[in-house]
Image (cartoon, rainbow, N blue to C red):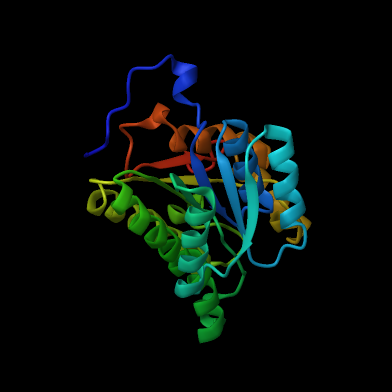
Amino acid sequence: MVLSQPENKHVLKAFDLSGKVAVVTGGARGIGLEVSIALAEAGADVALIYNSSKTAEALASDIASKNNVKALAYKADVGNQEEIESAIQQIASDFGRLDIIVANSGICTNVPAEDYTAAQWHDIMKVNLDGAFYTAQAGARIFKKQGSGNIIFTASVSATLVNVPQKQAAYNASKAGVVQMAKCLSVEWVDFCRVNCISPGYIATDILDIHPQEWREKWYDLVPAKRFAEAYELKGAYVFCASDASSYMTGANLVIDGGYTLP
């Protein structure tokens, strides 16, 4: 059914994800880990997909025990279509169903545009754009059969502005592609799933720590809030998008950036 209409619930119950099964790519670190925790706190069983984490299984076990849900970790390369398809099919089999896909995996490099090698450009697109599509595609195949589902992409404010002083044309282009892809998929798949984006601004994860201090000071100056967000501050937005609280929202791009994109 087009944008299946849920029953009119008490507002807090609309956020309840009990009985749902969620997949989060990049779910063992940074934003993805906080999203995995958030969905579990809301009652969902969660599968964390990781590529290089050495602690993913322990993190999944901790999430399960603290929230009385099922949580498991699965290793897969989102940029490999067959591999991510296999992982998501296995998750649906292991958990008995699939309701929510969070396509969150992403990487960023800072390279002057004139200096990109083909390999450097491809590496960004493979994870951020191709991987996001392959993840959504694998979920959509399941959602189409069962008649319902929910896809949430982690995009970025970099989809709508040009970050300075760093040079990252490939990353920005990949995230702009994710936002437009989500809009397209939200229309194409409207009969069986919702598709939305969340676009964070500067989030205080280990990815930011590698950058020079002068860059960080510049970013502070550009953000009206005069601070970065902690990853846990995104938890409510992902639960909102994953739950019946956003039942009529599809094709949206929810920007959470402390006002960074506004001036």
Nearer to me, 69 or 177: 69
Residue 187 appears in view: yes
Q: Say if 34 sits above or below 13 in the image.
A: below
Nearer to me, 36 or 94: 94
Q: Say if 244 sits above or below 205 in the image.
A: above
Asked if residue 60 lies left or right of residue 146, the reply is: right
Taking the view exactly as shown, the residue that stands out farthest to the bottom is 118
Asked if residue 149 lies left or right of residue 259, the reply is: left
Q: Quadrant of the N terminus?
A: top left
Asked if residue 9 lies left or right of residue 28, the reply is: left
Nearer to me, 154 or 95: 95
Which residue: 60% across, 43% down? 35
Residue 229 appears in view: no
Residue 135: percent from the left, percent from the top? Answer: 45, 61
Q: How many numbered marks, from 0 up?
A: 0
Which residue: 44% across, 55% down? 159
Q: Say if 28 sits above or below 69 in the image.
A: below
Residue 30: percent from the left, percent from the top? Answer: 67, 50
Q: Quadrant of residue 185?
A: bottom left
Which residue: 32% across, 21% down? 7
Which residue: 56% across, 80% down? 120
Residue 262: percent from the left, percent from the top? Answer: 47, 39
